[in-house]
Amino acid sequence: MYFVAKHPIQIRQAKPEDAATVAQLLHAAFIEFRSLYTPEGFAATALTPEQVLTRFSEGPVWLVHRDSTALGTVAAVPNGLSIYMRGMGVPPSARGIGVGSLLLEKVELWTTAKGCSRIFLSTTPFLHTAIRLYEKHNFRRIDVEPQDLFGTPLFTMEKILVSNES
């Protein structure tokens, strides 16, 4: 359990019955940017509950909540010796209290527990606050494909985790 602004914040792995909540969080997190996405790009970002259910078979999905209020979500997918982080969404009402940092820390802990040393993600150039958060957590932009999501521009960022073993 974490304490942010003197209220207990909990991170837990989402269950299939949380699919609608995850979909609502993603929609709330990205709706303000809808006009910057192509319609197909937005649909691939703000998933339906059915699409969220598919993600449960690909890797863990986490939820951050305080009491009964969901505050954010993120998913991770093993990809060889790397972890692909996707579907990170924090609605405007929960931004600025550390939810994004807690989600990133959870993915990093899970990545090291899996024996992996790299996390990568794709983001759009107009998600300035998210990009600053990723950079604060030592993610760096790299030049790899894909560079668009159904016509919405993308770029990839990665973080190389330092092993404690010598």
Image: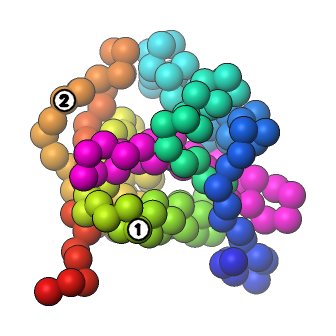
Q: Residue 36 in the image: x percent, y percent?
A: 45, 25
How far apart are labels 2 and 1 at the CA level? 27 Å
- 136 or 104, nearer to the observer: 104
For disc 1, the neighbor class at 10 Å (few under 14, some 14 to 19, many from 20) is few
Magenta-colored span: 64-92
- 160 or 57, nearer to the observer: 57
Residue 76 seen anywhere in this rendered image of the structure: yes
Q: Residue 95 in the image: x percent, y percent?
A: 61, 58
Asked which quadrant contains residue 132, the reply is: bottom left
Query: Overall secondary structure of the magenta stretch?
Result: strand
Which residue is pictured at 31% across the width and 64% down the height? 115
Which residue is under mark 2?
A: 145
Q: Residue 156 in the image: x percent, y percent?
A: 25, 41
Q: Is residue 104 magenta?
A: no
Q: Secondary structure at mark 1?
A: helix
- The residue type indicated by label 2 comes to Glu
Which residue is under mark 1?
A: 113
- The residue type indicated by label 1 comes to Ala
- For residue 152, side relative to residue 39 (left or right): left
Residue 31 seen anywhere in this rendered image of the structure: no
Which residue is pictured at 37% across the width and 15% down the height? 150
- 136 or 116, nearer to the observer: 116
Q: Secondary structure at mark 2?
A: loop
